[in-house]
Amino acid sequence: MAFLLEVLIGGLLAGIMYTMVALGFVLIYKASGVFNFAQGAMVLFAALTFVTLSEHGLAFPWALAASVAVMLALGVTIERVVLRPLVNAAPMALFLATLGLAFVLEGFAQLIYGTQVHGLELGISDAPIRSLPIEVSKLDLFAAGVAAALVAALGVLFQTTRAGVGLRAVADDPVAAVAVGLDLRRLWAIAWGGAGVVALVAGLLWGARVGVQFSLSLVVLKALPVLIIGGFSSIGGVIAGGLIVGASEKLAEVYVGSHVGGGIETWFPYVLAVGFLIARPTGLFGERLVERV
Amino acid sequence: MNDSAPLLEVQDVSLSFDGVRALDRVGFDVRGGEVCAIIGPNGAGKSSLLNVVSGLYRAGAGSVRFEGREISRAKELSALGIARTFQNLALFRGMSVLENIELGSDFRGRATFLEQAFRLGRAPREERRSRDDAREILALLEIAKHKSEIVGRLPYGLQKRVELGRALAPRPKLLLLDEPMAGMTFDEKRDMCRFIIHAHERLGTTLVLIEHDLGVVMDLSDHVIVLDHGRKIADGTAEAVRNDPAVIEAYVGNFLD
Amino acid sequence: MSSNATAWPSSSDVNEAAASTSRPLRQTLRIAAFILCAGAVVSLPFLVTDYVLSAILVPVLALALAGTGQNLVTGYAGQLSVGSAAFMSVGAFATYDAHLHVPGIPLLAAFVCGGLAAALTGVFFGLPSLRIRGFYLVVSTLAAQFFVEWLFTKVGWFSDYSPSGVITAPPLAVAGFDLSSPGGHYWLSLLVVAPLVALGRNLVRGRVGRAWMAVRDMETAAAVVGVRTGRAKLLAFGVGSFYCGIAGALWAFAYLGTVESHGLDLDRSFQVLFIVILGGLGSVAGPFIGAAFVILLPILLDQVGSAIVGGSVDPGLLQNVEKIVFGALVILLLIKQPAGMARLFYIASIRIGRWRARPA
């Protein structure tokens, strides 16, 4: 029983990390209506930027600030150069463009920063806390806290600030949004810039756990089942999705994987997502799409 | 044409969307060979009615019968001999005019994909027949010179014609047209009218069309049905309907002469 | 005009020639040109080096075949799939296992087994397309990709319990002809790819192709017109994966000489997808152009890099530059010319034709 609990908690914690990455996707999906395949590459790029600046002697707060600036600039640039010209394109074309973008960013990141694995020190220990009966580290709790704070902040932003409400309007009906006088370009810039910052946070936390390396950009793929299960457009859904994916993948790995040699986590979340889609095409919390003839 | 039983029977059809009554116990018959127009002010439920008849919407109550058999789903339409066009154009924009039209009668094909890949068996014959049938339609609608052009790049009026062509390709018994002349210039309308009449006369197709241009309606139709706020308020010949006070009131005197 | 309309060329589009000569003469010229080209293509092994055969022509043919399969699923039927490498993997392993466990099986028959196994896998992972539309469908082929990779690594039977999980391909021979030389590998690839492409072309120009494009362009309208959309989608996955399976067998047997599932990973699937985008979605020649580009670019970069640096260039560096170039090209093409390079060539040929036909 204690073992089950431990596995479950481990899964939930992993799920929190997935949620964080997925948040970046949600921002962009709400603003541009596209699944940004390049989000993982952005996470990698962000983490590499921070780590390289730190290694070159920049103190933590300066490195952080500089990285934020870089990611904001990157986000805005991407929106201008790639997304803007494709505004009227078919959704498949948009997605393929973000795929191309992912390749460009990955290549670029590794070209500038090199391909070695970097350790990332946030100053928070990743060792299990002795006082708790299950294996949870300070870093895990910190990550959970940051993720929760980020989610709460985004939730508040979407409901209260002009930009947030504007983004929701754009996601709902871009034509009406323009008709009402919303500046789409500014909103897109904000969304993409924001996604860049979220990528940085995710990159730092993931990097602190597993080190900053290329496989970080594969994290993006796990965010897809998270979004499918939770629905693309609801923040609450993303949280639920992340927890479900994290927990179920760990449980499957431990209980089923042990019989078949392990490694189930690589494909289980996707099969789960397919199951969800067949049963409920819009995810747990997403909206129904109506096709007008 | 068999006059004893109606070709299309719509009985007590009701339809609601999120509590809004789009159709309220609408019923009428369409006889084989006639031209039947459905008219009414905006929002009267004309397109919804057509969508129910063509199986795209499921009626909350009532039934639709074609040649005595109940229609329930859109994918049965072709096999039954019913074809339709759409208000907002449902063309396959990435394909050529010829390909769009050939598609209209493709459902009849029996050759398997292997026969098609190897060009054996029934495939070459069916392909030739499909092309010849389509060429006839191209000639009828005077769009032969556009046959290889991608539909998405054609002007709106021509696209409407291609959609009509696709619907005519299988030589259907019943043709449902949802505002076939919407958004057209006077000349385009006149041509479209001509094609529709021609199709009716040459192919013997029964027509049910939704149309706003009342002049066209009065000229073309044998039978007119008027809807207002989801209810049928008149059902008869063009002349009878024109003078019906309820109809006049619904339109607030906006008849064209 | 929205770029949506220009993004999907129809099969008849690329074949309209702006010729001013009469039809019978055009026909004869076409046939003559075809025979000449065919002759040139077949006699290449006598004209080029072994290196060109083994490192360029054979992989280009294999990848072009995979690209053709991908094109059927994504370019014509509009179903998003990122599992082409998984289907290639299934094809490679199934071909190997057929050869291993059915003594005396002819090589081509083993290839067909590979293709069929891949087709079944494709149909299985394509089943969700009956319920899921649009972008979401990508999870299904993602699942396929990861699952297949996992399966072939974990279950030793497929790789004949080889400790490294890698197996070597047997020597190639067809109908008694020994095809183990680089030229032989090339001819085998040609023998396999050419007929398949021709068959695919027939499919695409007929009812099946129209049904696919209808599903791609507007599925609800397709149903109204009587297209059996479910059947069309599964057929696309089946045939497309069949092609990928055979491409995988070629890749393993004729190119690498080994069958290994990690070389056919998600990156490879993306590469095949890129091939199709670069070459042009929905065009028959596109995958060949794309494949040639994908194979030649790294070689070109290597040469240029060596020339600039005056020595050999770090392969990791080259790989990253490749990534940037491919990614940028994909984006550029999607923005400027969604119909890919095939269309660029077509447009260029028309412009050249006009330029040459201008009054003196």
Image (spheres, coloured by chain):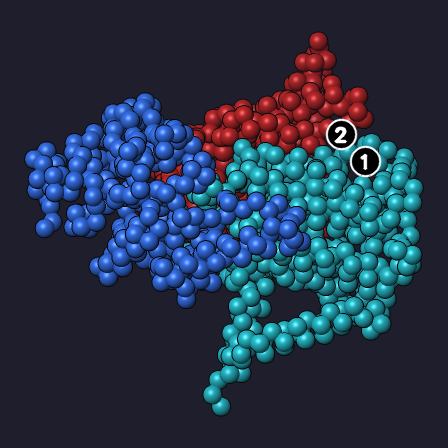
Chain colours: A red, B blue, C cyan
* Disc 1 target residue: C153
| Of A2 and C25, the residue lying toward us | C25
Q: Quadrant of residue B145?
A: bottom left
- Nearest to the observer: residue B217 or residue A222: B217
- Determine if residue C278 is in view: no
The spot of residue B189 in percent (x, y) is 25, 56
Identify which amino acid the numbered label 2 is placed on: Gly
Residue at which label 2 appears: A263
Residue at 86% x, 61% y is C184
Residue displayed at 85% across by 43% down: C96
Please state the horizontal and vertical placement of residue A99, each as a whole percent of the image: 59, 48
- Give how far across and how far down residue C211 sits, in percent: 53, 47
Q: Residue furthest bottom?
A: C360
Direction from residue B68 to residue B127 in the image, left or right: right
> Mark 2 vs mark 1: same chain?
no
Residue plotted at (40% across, 48% down): B171
Q: Relative to C226, does residue C328 appear above or below in the rendering?
A: below
